[in-house]
């Protein structure tokens, strides 16, 4: 099971080996502070105060240490991640690595099709993440007006990039 899943369900402490710390895990944190933080996230800019409050209820914020594996290719995955601070590295293949920046998200593919994680994603330094579990994901799609469109646009871009990479691998460079 992915580390974040175990943190979310409480089966490991957040600060195992002092490496992971919850920031505002939902319990003991003022909902208003979370809403203020969500207002700064471009993905939620079309949301009303009421919609932001419902996102704040289901989202948990985690600070994750550098090199933490957030998703592992081939494993089942139950969380959607949005980067608030820092960068995450997607190991698409041995040759191809993509850096994701604040405002970008990952982990949507397994939640949408129920398949295993398509890539390993690693914290490329200390990262602050907004994490939403599978059971809340479909509610989130309903509550956040632009999210479905943002997901579709991102998926289309990723398919295009994957096609281009496959094409490059099929067509060996002539070195010219
Ligand atoms: P998921 O398959 O659930 O877990 C791994 C995540 O990596 C995947 O969802 C996407 O969010 C992300 N991912 C996969 N391929 C790419 C890519 N080519 N570029 C950027 N992110 C990707």
Image (cartoon, rainbow, N blue to C red):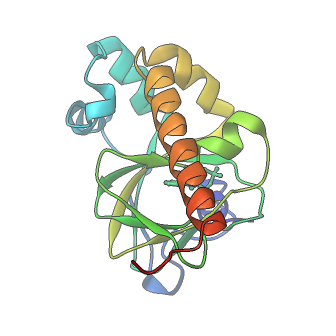
Whether 154 is drawn above or below 4: the answer is: above
| x and y percentages locating residue 43 in the rendered image | 33, 31
Q: Quick check: can you spot residue 62? A: yes
| x and y percentages locating residue 132 in the rendered image | 54, 41
Whether 133 is drawn above or below 126: the answer is: above
The C terminus - image quarter: bottom left
Residue in front for this viewpoint, 150 or 58? 150
| x and y percentages locating residue 155 in the rendered image | 54, 37
Q: Quick check: can you spot residue 26? A: no
Residue in front for this viewpoint, 21 or 75? 75
The quadrant in which residue 32 appears is top left
Count of numbered tags? 0
- Relative horizontal placement of residue 75, taking residue 79 as reference (left or right): right
- Relative horizontal placement of residue 47, taking residue 148 as reference (left or right): left
Q: Residue at x 41, y 65 (%)?
A: 88
Q: Residue at x 44, y 81 (%)?
A: 175
Residue in front for this viewpoint, 171 or 136? 171
| x and y percentages locating residue 157 in the rendered image | 47, 40
The N terminus - image quarter: bottom right
Whether 62 is drawn above or below 174: the answer is: above
The quadrant in which residue 99 appears is bottom left
């Amino acid at each position: 099971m992915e580390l974040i899943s175990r943190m979310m369900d409480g089966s490991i402490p957040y600060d195992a080996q002092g490496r992971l710390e919850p920031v505002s895990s939902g319990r003991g944190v003022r909902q208003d502070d979370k809403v203020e933080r969500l207002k700064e996230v471009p993905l939620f800019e079309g949301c009303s105060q009421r919609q932001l409050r419902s996102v704040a209820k289901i989202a948990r914020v985690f600070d994750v240490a550098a090199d933490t594996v957030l998703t592992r290719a081939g494993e089942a995955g139950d969380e959607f991640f949005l980067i608030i601070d820092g960068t995450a590295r997607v190991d698409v293949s041995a040759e191809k690595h993509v850096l994701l920046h604040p405002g970008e998200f990952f982990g949507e593919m397994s939640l949408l099709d129920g398949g295993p994680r398509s890539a390993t994603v690693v914290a490329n330094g200390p990262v602050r993440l907004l994490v939403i579990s599978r059971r809340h994901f479909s509610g989130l799609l309903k509550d956040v007006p632009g999210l479905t469109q943002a997901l579709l646009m991102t998926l289309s871009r990723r398919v295009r990039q994957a096609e281009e990479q496959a094409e490059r691998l099929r067509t060996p460079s002539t070195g010219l």
